[in-house]
Amino acid sequence: MNNKLIVSCQALEDEPLHSSFIMSKMALAAYQGGASGIRANSVQDIQAIKQEVDLPIIGIIKQEYDDSEVVITPTIKEVRALANTGVEWIAVDATDRIRPGGVTFAEFFQQAKEEFPAQKFMADVSTFDEAIAAEAQGVDVIGTTLVGYTSYSTDLKPLAVLKDILAETSLPVFAEGNMNTPDTARKAIMLGAEKVVVGSAITRPQFLTERFSKAIPTEPISLQREEKY
């Protein structure tokens, strides 16, 4: 993985591109564009992507449970399913939030490592403290995936959290979450991130269309004199 870019190819059930076939072609397009890794959701998508590209994969399963806010690989059941696919990394929510069944991250991860000692795990965190705690538990990679996505991290800036984590951890850190522009991704690498994971800004056309739609005025207006075109 000499290139620093990993592309997240995901589409949930309520999104137009939800299809393992489409995600496999999205991964192929990412590969042809220079990506050196893929992040994928679900066993079905991972299997389809493996048929199209020979790239390292960060595997997750997004699964909702009634008794927890944790969605990314929340229980050992999802870990077992992902381990059987042979993905290079399994990403798990490593936030302070309680997992289904009242399980803490430490309890969950201890079981995961006991069952799959050779598997590499990526900790998706939302704060500096969560990153340090995840390192202490023995994860292999830290990802800033959930910065801004937990109720207590909405005011945090992804690049600022990334910088703080990099200053304290000895683990590889993947910049992920709100990496919405090439400039942001570039800055993340310049700060010292091992890789940068980009999703919506590449693989979600409805998100990209919405950005354009909101930026275009509904009525013609004149450019201000100082604006260049």
Image (cartoon, rainbow, N blue to C red):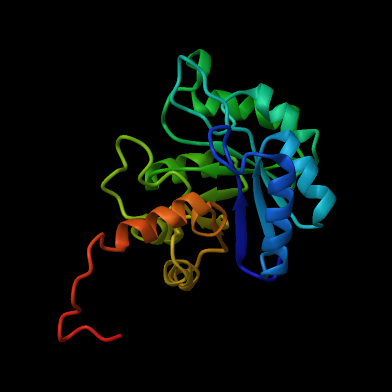
Task: Classify 48 as above or below 96.
Answer: below
Name which quarter of the figure residue 89 lies in: top right
Question: Where is the N terminus found, in terms of image quarters?
Answer: bottom right
Extreme residue toward the right, this view: 51
Mark yes or no: residue 170 visible: no
Give me the residue at 57% from left, 41% from top: 16
Q: Where is residue 180 in the image (x, y as percent from the top left)?
A: 44, 60
Q: Where is residue 195 in the image (x, y as percent from the top left)?
A: 58, 62
In this rendering, the count of numbered labels is: 0
Q: Closer to the camera, 108 or 202?
A: 202
Question: Where is the C terminus found, in terms of image quarters?
Answer: bottom left
Name which quarter of the figure residue 139 lies in: top right
From the viewer's perspective, is 39 left or right of 99? right
Give me the residue at 38% from left, 41% from top: 149
Task: Classify 229 as above or below 134.
Answer: below
Give me the residue at 62% from left, 39% from top: 18
Q: Position of residue 113 (x, y in %)?
A: 68, 32
Give me the residue at 74% from left, 49% from top: 24
Q: Closer to the camera, 146 or 171?
A: 146
Name which quarter of the figure residue 129 lies in: top left
Extreme residue toward the front, this view: 220
Q: Where is residue 51 in the image (x, y as percent from the top left)?
A: 84, 49
